Image (tube, rainbow, N blue to C red):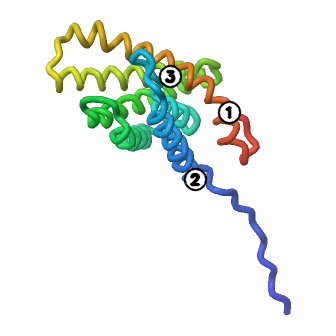
């Protein structure tokens, strides 16, 4: 008597792999390197790390816990290269920036605006603006500066960097998206 031949089944690869971790690590590393070597022109330089985690969050659409993890790691990586009087403020500010990016990406999805062409600009601009506002407010408190210095001197620089970061995020989003989804044969927005 012959043994029955078992039926072969096909199992698809897990959809939620740890690919997001590799992408996050790579982009944060690039961001830290660019942050370290970028010259400061008139008090303004892009915050490459925020641009990179904004791109990562736009592409991987993490939940709040993962976004906070991304922000925490980003904050830690910025401490050694910080040109600030209080580098530890990067941890709180990047937690806020990454969470802002996460909330925005979720809001775009809920509003069925994921295909919006300027989504990366908006996410990069607002994540940078929130992160920078938190960071400069912490700096204001640590240094004992008057509120007027924060509102009239620091916030305009934060918003300028926010616009610059929005542009950087928008420009880099497309090429990074193509690389990230190249092996899946998909074209996501």
Residue drawn at x 53%, y 25% is 110
In three-dimensional space, the C-alpha distance between marks 2 and 3, rounded to whole angstroms, equals 29 Å
Residue drawn at (46%, 39%) of the image = 32
User: Mark 2, mark 3: which one is toward the viewer?
Assistant: 3
The image's mark for residue 165 is 3
Dot 1 crowding, Cα within 10 Å, few <14, some 14–19, many 20+? few
User: Which residue does the image show at 50% across and 44% down from the upper left?
Assistant: 29
Quadrant holding the N terminus: bottom right
In the image shown, does 39 or 100 lie closer to the viewer?
Answer: 39
Q: Earlier in the sequence, mark 1 or mark 3?
A: 3
Could you say where residue 38 lies in the image, as x and y percent from the top left?
A: 48, 30
* Residue on which the image places disc 1: 175
- Which mark sits nearer the N-terminus, 2 or 3? 2
**Can you say whether 123 is above or below 87 in the image?**
above
What is the CA distance from the residue labelled 2 to the residue labelled 1?
21 Å
How crowded pointer 2 is (Cα within 10 Å; few <14, some 14-19, many 20+) is rated as: few
Residue 96 location (% of width, % of height): 35, 30
Question: Which tag is nearer the camera, tag 2 or tag 1?
Answer: 1
Residue pointed to by mark 2: 17
- CB of mark 2 within 8 Å of CB of mark 3? no
């Amino acid at each position: 008597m012959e043994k029955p031949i078992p039926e072969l089944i096909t199992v698809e690869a897990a959809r939620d792999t740890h690919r997001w971790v590799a992408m996050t690590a790579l982009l944060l590393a690039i961001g830290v390197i660019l942050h370290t070597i970028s010259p400061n022109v008139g008090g303004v330089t892009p915050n490459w790390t925020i641009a990179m985690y904004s791109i990562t969050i736009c592409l991987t659409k993490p939940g709040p816990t993962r976004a906070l993890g991304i922000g925490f790691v980003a904050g830690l990586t910025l401490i050694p290269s910080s040109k600030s009087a209080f580098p530890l403020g990067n941890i709180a500010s990047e937690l806020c920036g990454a969470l802002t990016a996460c909330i925005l990406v979720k809001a775009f999805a809920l509003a069925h605006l994921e295909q919006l062409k300027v989504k990366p600009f908006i996410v990069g601009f607002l994540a940078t603006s929130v992160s920078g506002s938190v960071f400069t407010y912490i700096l204001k408190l640590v240094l004992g500066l008057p509120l007027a210095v924060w509102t009239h001197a620091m916030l305009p620089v934060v918003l300028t960097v926010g616009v610059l970061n929005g542009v950087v995020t928008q420009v880099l989003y497309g090429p990074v998206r193509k690389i990230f989804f190249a092996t899946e044969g998909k074209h996501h927005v």
